Image (spheres, grey):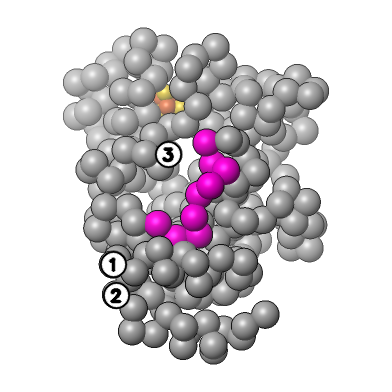
């Protein structure tokens, strides 16, 4: 495996936004910590953040990031509809990993008043609900950064099977440091870091989002089958709509 020093050399001089495909090729197969360190080098340490839902599969990326730099800004989308267990998990994990800059961001009060005064938009128009509770707040939070890290893996879903390690997201870079890992590797990392599970995982929730849009999953079902059950929707939109904001 090429050392981080050689990786820096390979990336030196690249204009990140224009060279994103070359960057992604260079980082393919590297360890998550190498990718996170390279991302900091490419966009600048104070211009890179990590976006986390503190869901059932969030801990491993947070642990790798904390290994590289526990002061990395972590953006957490508090939609107003999260399980209490998720908020508690955010606090537990942050403490355990020594993360010093976890920023909880919220939907704009005027958008909620205008579009979701009855708190039922999740039912009538979940895409609009995700837009005002996730996509718009994230777009505001990312305005101060030139790059962000997220924890998507290719094995998670057919819609994620070809995500690159680095991609362009409007005028910033998005890094997927865990993209190429297999499920067994993620589970091994979870064990190696001695990470606690999300409190709802043992109760039949292998994937946890907002309370009204998350249901228990039966044995043998896909891990994300409980998300927006009965609806065509499979993603919240932060990975498809953010460039438009
Ligand atoms: Fe709204 Fe459901 Fe999206 Fe949460 S997951 S923002 S409740 S539609």
Q: Which mark is residue 163?
A: none
Please give the residue where the numbered disc 1 appears in the rendered image: 18
Give the distance between the C-alpha atoms of the residues marked 2 and 3, in whole angstroms.
34 Å
Residue 39 horizontal/vertical position (percent): 44, 70
Give the distance between the C-alpha atoms of the residues marked 2 and 1, in whole angstroms.
6 Å
**Mark 1 C-beta to ligand 1 under 8 Å:** no
- Neighbor class of circle 2 (other Cα within 10 Å; few <14, some 14-19, many 20+) is few
Q: What residue lies at 50% left-to-right and 59% top-to-bottom?
A: 165
**Magenta segment includes 42:** no
Residue 245 horizontal/vertical position (percent): 22, 43
Residue 113 horizontal/vertical position (percent): 22, 22
Q: Quadrant of residue 85?
A: top right
Answer yes or no: do the residues labelled 2 and 1 have beta carbons within 8 Å? yes
Q: Which sits in the foreground, 84 or 33?
A: 33
Give the distance between the C-alpha atoms of the residues marked 3 and 1, in whole angstroms.
33 Å
Please give the residue where the numbered disc 2 appears in the rendered image: 15
Q: What residue lies at 63% left-to-right and 23% top-to-bottom?
A: 225
- Neighbor class of circle 3 (other Cα within 10 Å; few <14, some 14-19, many 20+) is many
Residue 197 position (above or below residue 219): below
- Left or right, residue 10 beside residue 206: left
Residue 19 position (above or below residue 75): below
Residue 92 appears in the rendering:
yes
Q: Which image quarter is the N terminus in?
A: bottom right
Q: What residue lies at 57% left-to-right and 43% top-to-bottom?
A: 161
Range of residues picked out in magenta: 159-167
Answer yes or no: do the residues labelled 2 and 3 have beta carbons within 8 Å? no
Q: Depth-wise, is mark 2 or mark 3 nearer the camera?
A: 2
Q: Which mark is residue 78?
A: 3
Residue 224 position (above or below residue 78): above
* Mark positioned earlier in the residue sequence (2 or 3): 2
């Amino acid at each position: 495996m090429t050392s981080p020093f050689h990786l820096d050399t390979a990336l030196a001089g690249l204009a990140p936004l224009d060279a994103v495909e070359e960057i992604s090729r260079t980082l393919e197969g590297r360890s998550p910590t190498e990718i996170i360190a390279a991302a900091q080098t490419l966009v600048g340490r104070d211009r890179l953040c990590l976006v986390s839902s503190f869901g059932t599969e969030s801990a491993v990326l947070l642990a790798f990031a904390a290994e590289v730099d526990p002061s990395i800004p972590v953006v957490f989308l508090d939609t107003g509809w999260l399980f209490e267990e998720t908020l508690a998990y955010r606090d537990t994990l942050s403490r355990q990993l020594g993360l010093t800059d976890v920023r909880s961001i919220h939907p704009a009060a005027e958008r909620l008043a205008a579009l979701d005064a009855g708190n039922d938009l999740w039912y009538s128009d979940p895409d609009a609900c995700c837009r005002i509770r996730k996509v718009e707040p994230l777009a505001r939070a990312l305005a101060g950064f030139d790059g962000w890290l997220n924890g998507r893996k290719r094995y998670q879903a057919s819609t994620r099977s070809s995500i690159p390690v680095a991609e362009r997201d409007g005028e910033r870079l998005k890094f997927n440091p865990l993209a190429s890992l297999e499920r067994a590797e993620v589970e091994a990392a979870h064990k190696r870091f001695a990470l606690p599970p999300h409190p709802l995982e043992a109760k039949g929730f292998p994937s946890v989002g907002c309370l009204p849009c998350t249901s228990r999953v039966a044995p043998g079902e896909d891990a994300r089958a409980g998300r927006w059950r009965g609806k065509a929707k499979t993603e919240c939109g932060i990975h498809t709509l953010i460039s438009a904001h």
